[in-house]
Amino acid sequence: ARFRQPPRTLEGMQASFEANLAPLIEAHRGTRFTFVYAPYAILVWLDFQQRGQLEVTLAFRRWLFERAAGWKHVEIFDFHAEPAIVMDLDHFTDIYHYSPRLSRGILEAIAEGRYRLTPELLEGNNAWLRKAARETRPEGVIAEALARPAPEAPDDKAFVPPGGYAPPRLN
């Protein structure tokens, strides 16, 4: 309980964006701003649903897309709803951080213009996130991850955190 986050509100997130990012975007119209909705493990979305934060998060995604549409020098790429990534815990070092290999893949996709957010992609991705967060069972995701041999590192790459990776203990 000591580290509990207060519930986010749409108004609070909008105010933060308007205070912190909008002035930079306005002041630097000659600079291209690329926002990336980086992938989170499905467990993040299940947590958002459990804490009543899913709909406010989806609403902010929609609001930001609409807000950014007025700027020709702003683009958004959306990896939040890529099932091949978010449903596979082997990509992640924890529920928010992913492997160097996946980072490279994301950068390549952005360079190629893939996952650029459009109105259709936004609606489809929000629908997928809503459905996945409501219907996915966390114990099933975890059991599936534990049933596979643990990689030495995410995506079998050489990134190893201090202390290395330890297999989970089941008590």
Image (tube, helix red, strand yellow):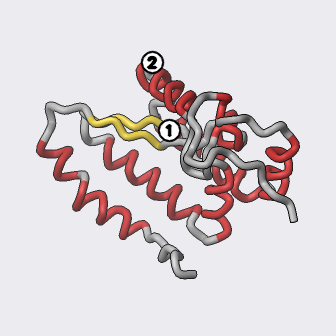
Q: For this rendering, which residue is in front, 149 or 11?
A: 149
Q: Which residue occupies 61% across, 28% down?
A: 157
Q: Secondary structure at mark 1?
A: strand
153 relative to 161, above or below: above
Q: Please state the horizontal and vertical placement of residue 45, each as a whole percent of the image.
A: 63, 56
Q: Is residue 161 left or right of residue 22?
A: right
Quadrant of the rendering where the N terminus is positioned: bottom right
- Disc sitting over residue 156 in the figure: none
Residue 35 lies in what quarter of the image?
top left
Query: Can residue 123 be seen at all in this image of the molecule?
Result: no
| Residue 107 appearing in the image | yes
Give the residue displayed 46% in from the left and 34% down from the top: 118
**Type of residue at label 1?**
Asp
Q: Is residue 45 above or below residue 106?
A: below
Number of labelled discs?
2
In-image side of 20 versus 12 (left or right):
left
Count neighbours of disc 2 (C-alpha within 10 A) and say few if under 14, some if 14 to 19, many if 20 or more.
Answer: few
